[in-house]
Amino acid sequence: VDDPARTASRIPSVALDILRTAVTEGPVLVSVPRAGYLPMLACQSCREPVVCRQCGRPMQAQGPDRRPTCRTHGAVADWRCAVCGRDVVRAVVVGVRRTAEEYGRALPGVRVITSAGDEHLRTLPGQDVMVVATPGSEPDPGPDGYAALVILDAAAALSRPGLRVAEEVLRRWFSAAALVRPADQGGRVLVVGDSDMREIQALIRWDPHGYADRELAERAALHLPPAVRIAQLTGPPLAALEVADELESELGTLIARRSGPLSGPEESVTWLLATSIADGAALTAALSRIQSLRSARRAAMVAARMDPVSLR
């Protein structure tokens, strides 16, 4: 794996300074948004994403000397880019194990351990350690807490698709920060990211309530959950349209907004119909009746979900 960026240039100097000092005062925590070693790769020459030719899923590297590996079909011994024909890959995203390696090299003499996924550590093996963990996998530091927390790649964590990604990321940041000892006892928290991000500002100000209020107001203006109830209809274009039309015909003005069609997997489309919270029960009951009648007529079925996490 070609990695043109040197370790020293990849690690923010302010993070190293904080960790170098704090690790002498107690355990320190580094939060990384992704597990694995190099969970996402691209061609070094043309930057084409490295995907498995059999299933089309992104490939990863499991160690410093490994070839691209598919989670389903295994390692590829002679991988070459389908676009330019080159055989050298670069890291797009760095996982928890690679991050632990880099910090271990940058801070010699510091014991570095990882905690993620199936290898989730519940407690620390000692107080003189640096823990590199994925969100939700942080070990219990004990009554004294962590001396410092560094949250890496904030933008990467927030860039994943999904309606509730940002609020979930922020919840996990608050949970990790709560494991750090109070500021008057020397505890420090650093977030590596754009300080203008509203999630980072909420963490800096320790203001989850203000963030929730603003988020709810925006979702209400856009007719998005949890300010409204939404029925998501996905299926063949004609069938999905029929169900959407029947719902709108039956509920009339109770439908506050209708959006679509959005393109879906395998030539399917998605329609979104929103009602107020108070009318959510009526929407659910009407959708259940329509689906039952279509099933009895053996009509093409449409997948229906209420208040989906993803709107695609």
Image (cartoon, rainbow, N blue to C red):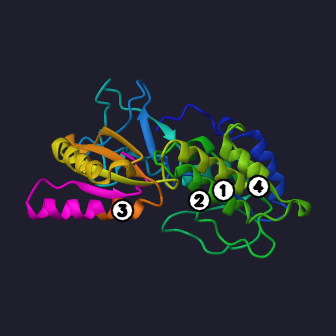
- The residue pinned by badge 2 equals 135
Residue 119 screen position, x and y as percent: 52, 68
Residue furthest out toward the left: 297
Q: Classify 121 as above or below 163.
A: below
Which residue is drawn at the image coordinates 49% and 34% (left, top)? Answer: 2
Residue 222 screen position, x and y as percent: 50, 42
Q: Nearer the viewer, mark 1 or mark 3?
A: 3
Q: Secondary structure at mark 3?
A: helix
Q: Give the residues in magenta.
A: 286-312
How far is the residue under mark 2 from the one under mark 1?
Answer: 8 Å
The amino acid at mark 1 is Trp
Residue 111 visible to the viewer: no
The amino acid at mark 2 is Pro
How far is the residue under mark 3 from the one under mark 4?
Answer: 39 Å
Residue 190 screen position, x and y as percent: 75, 49
Q: Nearer the viewer, mark 4 or mark 1?
A: 4
**Marked residue nearer the N-terminal end (2 or 1):** 2
**Marked residue nearer the N-terminal end (2 or 4):** 2
Asked whether the beta carbons under mark 3 and mark 4 sit within 8 Å of each other, the answer is: no
- Left or right: residue 298 versus residue 255 is left
Q: Quadrant of the C terminus?
A: top left
- The residue pinned by badge 1 equals 173
Residue 225 screen position, x and y as percent: 48, 53
**Marked residue nearer the N-terminal end (3 or 2):** 2
Which residue is drawn at the image coordinates 19% and 47% (left, top)? Answer: 242
